[in-house]
Amino acid sequence: MIQLLGRHRRTAAALFHALVVAAALSAAFLLRFEFTLNGRDGRMLALALPVALAVKLVVFRAFALRDLPWRYIGLEGVTRMAAGSAVASLAAAPLLVWESGSAFPRSICVLDFLLCLGFMTGTRFAIRLLCKPRHAREAGRGPGATPRRILIYGAGRAGVTLLSEIREHPKLVYQVAGFLDDDPQKRDLLLRGVRVWGGRAALAKVVRRKRINEVLLALPRAPGTEIESILEHCRAAGVATRRIPLLAELIEDRTLMRQIREVRVEDLLGRPPVELEESAIREGLEGKIVLVTGAGGSIGSELCRQMARYQPAAIVGLDQSEAALYQIDREMCERFPKTAFRAELGSIQSRRRLDEIFEAHRPHAVYHAAAYKHVPLLEAHLFEAVDNNILGTHQVAWAAAAAGAETVVLVSSDKAVRPVNIMGATKRMAELVWMGAGQAEPHMRFLAVRFGNVLGSSGSVIPLFRRQIAAGGPVTVTHPEMRRFLMTVAEAAHLVLQAAAMGAGGEVFTLNMGEPVRILDLARRMIRLSGLEPDIDIRIEFSGVRPGEKLCEELSAYEENTVPTPHAQIRVFTCKRVAHEALARCLQDLRQAVEARDAAGAVLSLQDLIPEYHPSAFVLQRALGEPARALARAV
């Protein structure tokens, strides 16, 4: 019968609705007249039936009730049937009264509506019950595997949906022994006949008592810290754990290994994200023209997005990458159509191009995020690093001064502290250039902001670890004791904006990021948050420290004094001043070294102004390629 209904669904539905309308109206008459119909009542019913059939079948078709499934019934289907029945009864009532005269009882219309809705929903529930034995027979024809006893962690919508899916697909060979949920109000509830046993405190006891083989986590939106705590309890109880992905992720074409929730970078901080104040930021940006160098990069693009919230008069985005600039230009136009975004293609190494851009836009504030930053690459490309990170920064500083900018902010790095690599040395030199420009232009505010590792930015370990986990491993870590300060891209952009709002000039700001995090722990956390187990599901390998890398970065040098700021999570370092003549001489020597491709001269010039800089053996032995005498002098 069910198969026949499936082949001729719409015809069967129309006949079924006609039968329901006739049965409901007849039953309404019988109930109204206490199951005793005289001749007049019978004639009234005979006249009312054609009218009710004609009106209700038309309304039911308009509400697409013929297209509702037979074996499944949910809230949306019941709501649609109730609305269709109500409209049909309201439409038929005046015609019935008009045709039968004032003797037609109005209560029959109410009874007819209730009975019609009850017959339609009740029939579908009955069909659904009839289908259940068929599923049981299919389950009995399985390969004979013993059902795995499981707990579902999460008694919310996702958990109940998972329970329904398991019951509808007996080939999964799962037996749900209960729910776990940390909400005390859900404890001891029965959800679809399955009990909620408690929260994570009860996990070990329930696992032993119910002989649980596996825990399925149905918490698609839980924060990473909560998931990590639950995983720890599951490991302590000795039970396997898997996390159920979001439906949106299952829709995408992914392999099983890729059906893991994208780990949010906030999950990996090991601390709550820092929330910064906004009133002072708005005051510094609203109605102003701002220029962002490196606007297509991770920090620069996030700065553009954050600035747009504060209604600047215009945002000028400068980048030498055509593709990156195109992407941020399209995004800003689509997401922030009320904010004027002006894309400018060019390099900070070209003073002529910088003068054109600054003269055309006359920005009130400049945020200098353009830089080369990949440590291993820059160790092998000394001249490009110096030309861009130092000489290019010098060009930006003086172009901003010539255009009369009020506030100029440099994006620096924690690698600038006692640098051991080219990237850190060029960033420290850029800070000195910035502060020197501030001394020469006291009416302007030159300030810098130091970052730790920005999670999820281009070149960070997070995208690399994601790809390695999705591929099934191994995940590569350079050294078991490698540690880094971590922050999110949003925190980095907020820190830059907050520094611009509170700085007086000459400061180097940094965010209080807590203790540095071991990269090995970060890798393990990412693997676990993906629902897998390190060194069991995903292997971790150590690749060795790369040239120019420290085991642990720092945020301040010994000679810098820490000064608190009005914001509890931001501190400022007052750097020692550098004589203008020494700075100018170093810049001239670096420019000549770049032009002459004199690597030894460039390293010596950096060490003259940054005596704490100790070049890596890679730079001395491979990148320089100078005679031994010059190398000895550089050391």
Image (cartoon, rainbow, N blue to C red):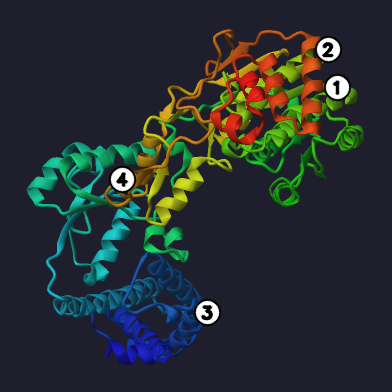
The kind of secondary structure element at disc 3 is helix
Residue 424: x, y in percent?
61, 26
Indicate the amino acid at tag 3: Ala
Q: Which residue is mark 2?
A: 440
Residue 401's mark?
1
Q: CA distance from mark 4 to mark 3?
A: 57 Å
- Answer with mark 2 or mark 4, whichever residue precedes in sequence: 2
Indicate the amino acid at tag 1: Ala
Q: Which residue is mark 4?
A: 534
Q: Please state which of the two labelled residues, at mark 4 or mark 3, is closer to the viewer.
A: 4
Asked if 555 appears above or below 57 in the picture, the reply is above
Asked if 633 appears above or below 421 in the picture, the reply is above
Q: Which residue is mark 3?
A: 62
Indicate the amino acid at tag 4: Pro
Q: Are marks 4 and 1 in contact (CB under 8 Å)?
A: no
Mark 2 Cα shell of 10 Å, populated few (<14), some (14-19), many (≥20): few
- Answer with mark 4 or mark 3, whichever residue precedes in sequence: 3
